[in-house]
């Protein structure tokens, strides 16, 4: 019921970004479980499936931000940050966004949950060759890079 507020806020933010074109800094996690599956989230405020993550706050490191976002979105306090998968430039939504993607290992896939149902509608583990319909193109590109063991960079 409160999810409609997130949808309205999301639309307002995208309009703001188009007008102001701010420079932003974000993080995402390629969460991999022992079976090689990838965790994806579906937000309340935008269609599609995405890697979990979000914005980096002022005076916050990228590492602290991804740990905070994983706790806030999917309830994970215990993840192993294996390495930086890549750094990308995203100008799709009208902002000048730089995104750091971390490759992370999750020992206990059952520990993943919807931590904030106002923000996250669904969360799940998916085999790389069985991604859900609506998985965003950028998410698919990051997973392909991971499968090819390529370092990522460039356009989101």
Image (tube, rainbow, N blue to C red):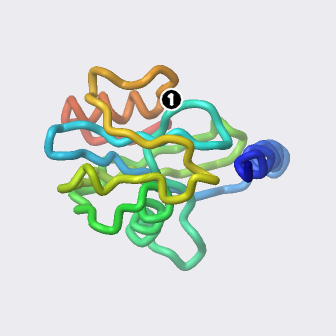
Picture quarter containing residue 91? top right
The reply, left or right, for residue 104 in relation to residue 10 is: left
Residue in the foreground of this view, choosing between 46 and 26: 46
Q: Is residue 39 above or below residue 113?
A: above
Residue in the foreground of this view, choosing between 53 and 130: 130
Measured as percent of width and height from the top left, residue 88 is found at 46, 45
The reply, left or right, for residue 36 in relation to residue 5 is: left
Badge 1: residue crowd in 10 Å (few <14, some 14–19, many ≥20):
some
Picture quarter containing residue 47? top right
Residue 21 visible:
no
The residue lying at 80 percent from left, 46 percent from top is 8
The residue lying at 47 percent from left, 52 percent from top is 114
Q: Is residue 133 above or below residue 89?
A: above
Q: Residue furthest bottom?
A: 59
The reply, left or right, for residue 138 in relation to residue 147 is: right
Measured as percent of width and height from the top left, residue 3 is found at 70, 48
Residue 154 visible:
yes
Which residue is the site of mark 1? 136
Measured as percent of width and height from the top left, residue 80 is found at 23, 62
The residue lying at 72 percent from left, 41 percent from top is 94
Q: Secondary structure at mark 1?
A: loop
Measured as percent of width and height from the top left, residue 137 is found at 48, 26
């Amino acid at each position: 019921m409160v999810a409609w507020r997130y949808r309205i806020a999301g639309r307002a933010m995208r309009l703001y970004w188009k007008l102001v074109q701010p420079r932003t800094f974000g993080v995402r996690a390629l969460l991999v479980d022992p079976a090689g599956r990838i965790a994806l989230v579906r937000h309340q405020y935008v269609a599609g499936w995405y890697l979990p993550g979000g914005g980096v706050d002022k005076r916050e490191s990228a590492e602290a931000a991804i740990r905070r976002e994983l706790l806030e979105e999917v309830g994970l306090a215990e993840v192993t940050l294996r390495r930086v998968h890549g750094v990308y430039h995203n100008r799709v939504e009208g902002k000048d966004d730089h995104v750091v993607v971390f490759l992370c290992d999750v020992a206990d896939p059952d520990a993943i949950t919807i931590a904030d149902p106002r923000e996250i509608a669904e969360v799940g583990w998916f085999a790389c060759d069985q991604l859900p319909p609506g998985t965003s193109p950028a998410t698919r590109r990051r997973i392909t890079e991971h499968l090819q063991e390529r370092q990522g960079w460039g356009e989101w």
